[in-house]
Image (spheres, rainbow, N blue to C red):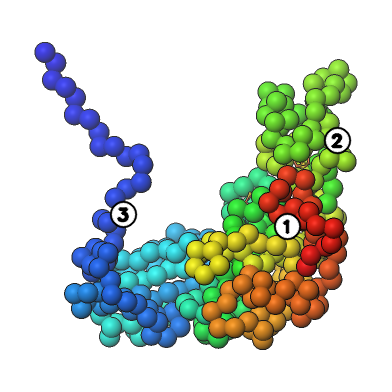
Amino acid sequence: MATPKKMAPRDNGAPDFKKYLHPLMAKNYGKWKYHERLRPGVLVYVAESGDALYTVRAGSPRTMSVDTVRKVCDIADKYCQGYLRFTSRCNIEFSLSNKEAIDPLIQEIHDVLGFPVGGTGPSISNIIHTQGWLHCNLPGTDAAGAVKALMDTLFDDFVNERLPNRVKISTSCCQINCGGQSDIAINLQHHRPPKINHNKMQICELPKVVAICPVAAIRPRKVNDKDSLEVVEEKCMYCGACHGQCPSMEIRDPDADTLSIWVGGKSASTRSGPAFMKLATWGLPNNPPRWPEVSDAVGKILDAYRAGAKPYERIGEWIDRVGWKRFFEVTGFPFTKYHIDNYRHARTTFNTSSQVRL
Ligand code: SF4
Ligand code: SF4
């Protein structure tokens, strides 16, 4: 009988995360007493056993070279027994057990990496952006560039804790918005239906392109005796989903695309629960390399939030309390017909009263 071959270890599925925890974190897993912020960017977690684990949070630019990642690892080896983690907002959290090493670690993060330390408590967390040109075929703008320009203006609110509560910001380079829900989200918007290049239609994909349109605006059509598609323009809502399916359905338009800002989203279940974002302002020019109009609009929202919110209120909670009418007054953004949610399938948010409620 043939000897059964030894099977290779399974390498699918999520790895056992406990292997990657700092030894103190693994030892005290589920047995933490409390945590507190010692200063902006520095936290301490105290366990029932009396162990204390410190974390130093640095803002990363998210897209990093191999050389930079090696420098990050060298710093973690030197001060943190090699342990660090990336947060969902691309902060790097260095974990360490030696309190005395905090100051030298921060100094080295500044000197070697040039990254700021902060982003904890009532501050701006590191801004997240979507993959953009690096890894996606849809971008109508450069989300990473907008983050860099915006973060330059918000730097002081990252390294200080002086807002009513934490503010999470994201930028997305299309309306698919893989940046997710945020207190403030900057999204690109298209304003025209896709232009079809009938000479380059990929025939095998046509049924998929028809199927992907959420409002059934795409239908088959013969062009020059060849199978192609057409868009019913009155139905199209310029979402760009068809462009993701078929590169020959070009939705991006440098003359017409603009940026919009949405507010009040959050994923946390604290207090008011998770919330979707709502439109604050739209029609901002897609204006690289610094997008000054975007930075200006975000600044207005943050100034109004800082002045009007109660401690611990997130941006959405503040707006819910003071009302959208007041939000438009204090930010100075024009209120337009596009701020009214009348999407035909939005049964739970559809305005069914005879008055427009603000
Ligand atoms: S936001 Fe849109 S364009 Fe940008 S990476 Fe995500 S899917 Fe691609
Ligand atoms: S942009 Fe969106 S709504 Fe318009 S045709 Fe394409 S998938 Fe349909």
Residue 137 vertical position relative to residue 217 in the rendered view, above or below: below
* Residue underneath mark 3: 17
- Secondary structure, mark 1, is strand
Could you tell me which residue is drawn at 47 percent across and 77 percent down? 120
Give, as a three-letter code, the residue at label 1: Leu
Give the mark nearer the N terminus: 2 vs 3. Answer: 3
Task: Check disc 1 and report the residue beneath it.
Answer: 188
154 or 339, which is in the foreground? 339
Question: Is the shortest distance between ligand 1 and the CB of mark 3 under 8 Å?
Answer: no
| Amino acid beneath label 3 | Phe
Q: Residues within 10 Å of mark 2 (few under 14, many from 20)?
A: few
Tell me if I can see residue 101 in this picture: yes
Mark 3 burial class by Cα count in 10 Å: few <14, some 14-19, many 20+: few
In the image, 228 versus 43, the foreground residue is: 43
In space, the residues marked 2 and 3 are separated at their CA atoms by: 49 Å
- Amino acid at circle 2: Val
Residue 27, image x, y percentages? 20, 65
Furthest residue in direction top, as rendered: 1
Q: Quadrant of the C terminus?
A: bottom right
Label 2 near ligand 2 (CB < 8 Å) = yes
Left of 319 or right of it: where is 77?
Answer: left
Which residue position holds label 2?
A: 232
Judged left or right of residue 257, residue 71 is: left
Nearest the viewer among 231 and 276 is 276
